[in-house]
Image (spheres, coloured by chain):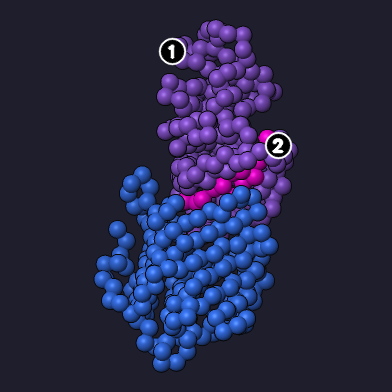
Amino acid sequence: MIRALLTLLLCLSLLPFATAGPGAEAAALRSVQAGFVQQKHLQILTRPLVSRGTFAFQAPQSLRWEYLEPLHSILIMHDGRVEKAVERDGRFERDTGSGLDAMQVILRDLGSWLDGRFADNPMFSVSRRDARTIILAPRDPGLETVISSIKLRLGREPGVMESVTIFEGPDAWTRLTFTGTVVNRDIPADIFRLP
Amino acid sequence: MTARPVFWLAAVLLATSCAMPPRAVPPEITAAADSAAPTPPCAALFPAGRWQFVHTIAFRTDQGEGTALGVVVLSQTEIRCALMTVEGLTLFEARAAGEAAPEVIRAIPPFDRPGFATGLMRDIRLIFRPPPGKAETGRLADGGPICRFTEADTVTDILPRQDGCWSIHAYTDRTWSRTIQARACRPIASAAIPGRLELTAGEPDGYSLTMQLVSAERLPAGD
């Protein structure tokens, strides 16, 4: 179950890049950078729990997924490796016991995500509610107990994702809303290194 | 969110027996309190009314460490809690009325193992609720004030400090079981809320939790 969970989380982290659509347009997607606001809704929460962060992706397989608050943490995928660090008492500590092998498995799926070929990932069945809304439903019953569905809201421009909503159950869901998306701008290489 | 930290977080909180070597039995209360009042100011150290707390939780054991987000919602009659990954996925959610056994709303493995919900709720009660039992106040040999709550084989000592924070030491069968250090306390909605809580437990293998306050919000009255 945990492995499936990790797999899913990494899929979600890659989703913002998977919006360029199939064909030549998608192949031209070299990099994406954006900020995000994550709102966590739970039955017990009187108000949603808000996290903020940024991400940077560079084709073919480099990712920096960084939460700035409430907990500063950085996930790096680069050169086939996956690393994570969490800031504790003012300094970053590597998250060493992380079972990151599951994340590396997902990196192999990145190409299909970038091409907008959502259906290539066997973990999910894919349907379109309208031109800009994609629904992913887990095929694995085990995964379904963790995530009931995922809704992708595509932006009006290629390469831009408006939001991702992850439904865990009727009263539990998380929405990532992306802002300030920049496509195909050069990204310094040291962005994909942990501090 | 990673597999091994999740496992260890579950493992350390699942602890139920085989305590570490005890630090000390409850210390002697050498002088009675000046007032006949049973517990003040100790009871006032705990948040009253309805609150929502969010903490980052760093956990450490001999075998591993990791980080999660924790939510606790208190009301007069109920405690609700949730653990989440940094990425926002819900690992565990439960609620408990009074001293009743917790009702688990959601738990993904390994947080669905027997004893986890009870152990987690026990720690939350120790942190956020005045201890049950007969109360006495006094001073320790070093002159520091103490509030002691005794119920059956459980003794809970609260040691208020001059900086407005406090320590809690819990004993079972005259053996130390856990300590909580509250630090960086500051007034929020007329309550002294710790900015940092450090829990050290002496159950199998021992574990420690460092809880850094993200938000403390007084909620409107009503359950």
Q: Nearer the viewer, residue A81 or B67?
A: B67
Q: Colour of chain B?
A: purple
Q: Quadrant of the C terminus of chain B?
A: top right
In the image, what residue occupies the spot 46% across and 27% down?
A: B165
Q: Are marks 2 and 1 in contact (CB under 8 Å)?
A: no
Q: Colour of chain A?
A: blue
Task: Decide: is B42 above or below B123.
Answer: above
Q: Is residue A123 left or right of residue A57?
A: right
Based on the picture, tell me whether residue A117 belongs to the magenta stretch: no
x, y percent for residue A124? 60, 78
Segment tinted magenta in the rendering: B67-82
Q: Chain of mark 2?
A: B
Query: Which element is circle 1 on?
Result: loop
Q: In terms of secondary structure, where does tag 2 sit?
A: loop
Q: Is residue A22 above or below residue A82?
A: below
Residue type marked 1:
Asp
Q: Viewer-proximal residue, B1 or B115?
A: B1
Closest to the observer: A16 or B223?
B223
**Mark 2 on the same chain as mark 1:** yes
Q: Determine which residue is flagged by label 1.
A: B142
**Spot occupied by residue B160 in the image (x, y as percentages of width and height):** 49, 22
In the image, residue B79 lies in the stretch drawn in magenta: yes
Q: Which residue is mark 2?
A: B77
Q: Taking A66 as reference, is B189 left or right?
A: right
Measured from the top left, where is residue B216 in percent x and y? 52, 41
The answer to whether residue B36 is visible is: yes
Q: Amino acid at mark 2?
A: Thr
